Amino acid sequence: MTMIPLRLFPWILGLLAFSSVQCAQSSTAPAVPAEACAGDRPGAPCFVTRIMCVGDSNTQGGADLPSYRYPLWFDLQAAGSLVDFVGTQFVTVGENGTTQPNLTQFPEYYTSFDRDHEGYSGYRTDELLPLLAPAVAMDCPDVCVLLMGTNDIGQRGAIGAQEALIGLEELVKEVRSQAPATMFLIGTLPPIGPGSFYFANEAFVPQFNGD
């Protein structure tokens, strides 16, 4: 299983979105009405690439940062990529609409940022598994971004790292049981910082990432 650093996500997803546009524009099939395939963005073109960001608090985000999803969204917009973030969730940990997230730092959070995601703070891969099939069946993602395993490692160390790798494979199978054509980007986990109560197991993160 190949994992990809988060810094490469905008470039790769931009290419996937561009490929979707080229495929749609060159297709000889009859046009499909926008409302039949554009998800929750009225008027969006049919060749929009639907991206589901799946994971734990690294995906859901919190007060300090609405996760990697916020900069990723605006990187894709700046590149002209036609994308739609999808998912059944739309809030960060502790979100209250005023101070969390910090709207001074993230002024477009409630305006042009697409908040939809499938992130669950504190969840291990096995805990996320039963929630994923219904979400995929509802939102039909073209691309699934998986960033998962921190809680497995933090709670269970070396055993958790192995369980997380197996769990990722199960998550991929679960998505493909509902949407067989879905493409995947599986991210390397960020380091566990010394302020975290998971820090004792930080050494297992590079093992998980394949370093």
Image: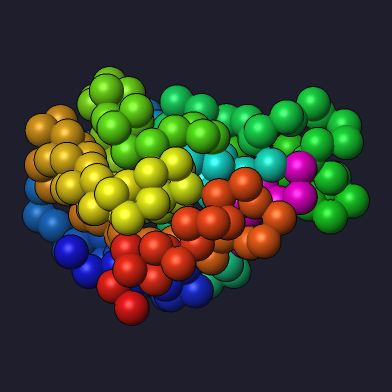
Q: Residue at x 18, y 47 (%)?
A: 166
Q: Is residue 72 magenta?
A: yes
x 57%, y 30%: residue? 90
- Residue 28 image offset from top left, x and y in percent: 10, 55
* As drawn, 20 above or below 85: below
Asked whether 130 or 96 is in front, the reply is 130
Taking the image as shown, residue 49 lies to the left or right of residue 22, namely right
Q: Is residue 139 left or right of residue 181?
A: right
Q: Is residue 82 visible?
A: yes
Check if residue 166 falls in the magenta segment: no
Quadrant of the rendered image containing residue 130: top left
> Residue 179, percent across and down?
16, 37
Q: Nearer the viewer, residue 126 or 76?
A: 126
Of residues 146 and 114, the one drawn nearer to the viewer in this rendering = 146
| Residue pictured at 32% horizontal, 47% vertical | 160
Q: Quadrant of residue 44?
A: top left
Left/right of residue 33 with respect to residue 95 in the rendered view:
left
The picture places residue 105, in percent across and down from the top left corner, at: 84, 55
**Range shown magenta:** 63-73
Q: Compare residues 54 and 197 and report the one nearer the observer.
A: 197
Displayed quadrant of residue 208: bottom left
* Quarter of the figure with the N terminus: bottom left
In the rendered view, tell whether residue 159 sits above or below residue 4. above
